[in-house]
Image (cartoon, rainbow, N blue to C red):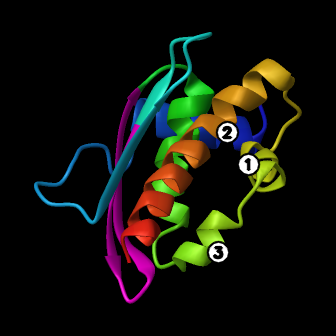
Amino acid sequence: MNIYQQELLDHYHTPRNKGSFERADFSSAVHNPSCGDSVSFQGLVVDGKIDLLRFEGRGCVISQGIASILTERLKGMDLSAIMALDEQFIKELVGFPIGPTRLKCAMLPLQALQQGIGLYQAKD
């Protein structure tokens, strides 16, 4: 098992920032009906950057582990930079080769987060 697999498993078994806020600046949820995975995010924004980020979800090690990792790695990041993140960023986070089906699982958290940020930015 490589270090990336260990990190994913750790975040899956001991998720960071799991839960919700009473009041959030943005929220979003995405569900993949083909596998049943779901991820939702809530975030607080200060000066155009992620101040706090929480998630809830259900699904496989990859979707839930990546969601947890994102809550830590993206704290303090500018919203526009998060909106520019792509499949390559997620592949680097995963750290080991995955096929197209598993890539959909890995992309689900980023899609949910970008959806929420997009709705937040549209309000301004």
User: Measured from the top left, where is residue 117 in percent x and y?
Assistant: 47, 62
| Disc 3: CA contacts within 10 A as few (<14), some (14-19) or many (>=20) | few
Q: What separation in Å lies between label 1 and label 3 (alpha carbons)?
A: 14 Å
Identify the amino acid type marked 1. Ile
Image quarter where the N terminus lies is top right
Q: What separation in Å lies between label 2 and label 3 (alpha carbons)?
A: 16 Å
Numbered tag placed on residue 46 in the rendering: none
Establish if 104 lies above or below 94. Answer: above
From the viewer's side, name the closer residue of 114 and 66: 114
Q: Quick one: label 1 or label 3, which is nearer the N terminus? A: 3
Q: Quadrant of residue 29?
A: top left
Q: Which residues are magenta?
A: 40-57
Q: Please identify, in this view, whether the residue under mark 1 or under mark 2 is nearer the observer.
A: 2
Numbered tag placed on residue 90 in the rendering: 1
Identify the amino acid type marked 3. Ala
User: Measured from the top left, where is residue 58 in percent x and y?
Assistant: 41, 22
